[in-house]
Amino acid sequence: MIKAFKILGLLFVSCALVIGASGDADAKKKKKKPVVKRMKYVGAAKCNGSCHDAYYEAWKASPHGKTFELLKPGVRADAKKRAKLDPDKDYTADPHCLRCHTTGYKQRGGFKPAGTKKKIKIKKGKNKGKVKVKDVSTKIDPEEPSLEQVGCEMCHSAAGGSEMRIMMKNTKGKFKKSDNEKFGQRWDYTNVCTRCHSHEKNPFQPSLDAKYKFDFAAKAKLVHPTEKFWNEDNEDQKLVETKKRRKETAQSEKTPLVIEDWGFRKGKLAFKKGTLPFTRKKETFNYKK
C-alpha cells in the first residue's frame, strides 16, 4: 500500500513537472515580440493611440503636420512666385519636393505618391506565374496624417521606426539612448533639421527672404507643443524617462550622422553615394568624419 502511494506521489510530481515545463514553454511563446532586422518607415500614425497620443496630436497641428498641403495648387502662392515656382502647379507628385515634404520618400516603407505602380508575380491559382500591376500609392487619410507629412521618423530615425517602436514597447519606455540608437534612433536633431531647412536644394533660401534663415531653437518649440493635448486618457503616456536620458550622450550627439544629398536621373530622385545615414546592405550607420 505504501509503495502504491509512493508511486502515485511520483506520478503527481512528474505531472507537475510536465505542466510546469509546458507553462514555461507557453511563457516563452508569449514572450515580447522580438526586434526584427529589416528597418523600414511606418508613418506617424503608428505613434498615435496607446503610445504618444498627445505628441501625435500636437505634431498634427504643427507646421510639420501640414507640409504636404503646401505642395497643392494655390497654397502660399506669393512665396512660390518669389522662389520662381508655379503657384498653380500641383507638386504633390514632384520628386523635387517629396523628399522634404513627406516621410521616407524613396526609402523602404516610405511615402509613395499617387499613381505609383508595382509589378507583382502571382504565386498561386490559375494565373500563377503571370505578372499583375498593383497600385501601391500611400493611402492618405485627412483625419489621421502619416507618411504624407514630415512625420516623427524624419527627425527621430535614420532608417525608419519599425524596430524602434517594438523596442520602446518591450521596455515600456525604459531604455538608454544607446539601446534605441542601434535600431535607427538619432539624437543629432540640430544636424538632422539641416537636411531640408538648410539644404542647398531648398528653393526657399535666406537670400530670398531673411525669414528662411533656420533657427533650430525657435523651430523646435513648434514641433511638439503638447500642453493642450493632455487629458485623463493619455496622462500615463508622458515621457518621464527622458529626464534620465538627458544625462546620457548618444553616439550621434558626439558624431552626427551624415546628411542625405540627392540628384535626379530621368526625372527620378536618386541619393548620392555615401550620403545616406544608414547603409542597408551592411546594416551600418554612417557618421560624419
Image (cartoon, rainbow, N blue to C red):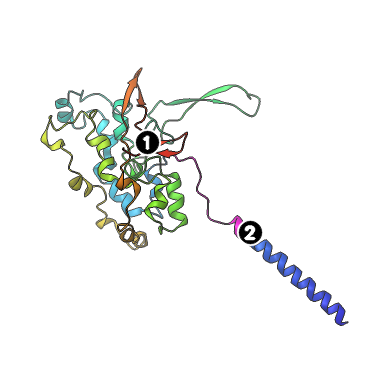
Dot 1 amino acid type: Gly
Report the side of 225 relative to 170 (left or right).
Answer: left
- Figure quadrant of the N terminus: bottom right
Question: Which residue is under mark 2?
Answer: 26
Farthest residue to the right: give it.
1
Q: Quadrant of residue 121?
A: top right
Q: How many marks?
A: 2
Which residue occupies 26% across, 41% down?
191
- Observer-nearest of 80 and 266: 266
Report the side of 19 relative to 214 (left or right).
Answer: right
Q: Where is residue 17 in the image (x, y as percent from the top left)?
A: 71, 67
Magenta-colored stretch includes residue 39: yes
Which residue occupies 56% across, 56% down?
31
- Observer-nearest of 261 and 264: 261
Q: Position of residue 24 (x, y in %)?
A: 64, 62
Magenta residue span: 25-40
Which structural element holds mark 1? loop
Dot 2 amino acid type: Asp
Query: Can residue 58 be seen?
Result: yes
Query: Can residue 94 be seen?
Result: no
Looking at the image, residue 272 lies above or below residue 169: above
Name the N-terminal-most of marks 2 and 1.
Answer: 2
Which structural element holds mark 2? helix
Looking at the image, residue 202 lies above or below residue 231: above
The tag on residue 45 is none
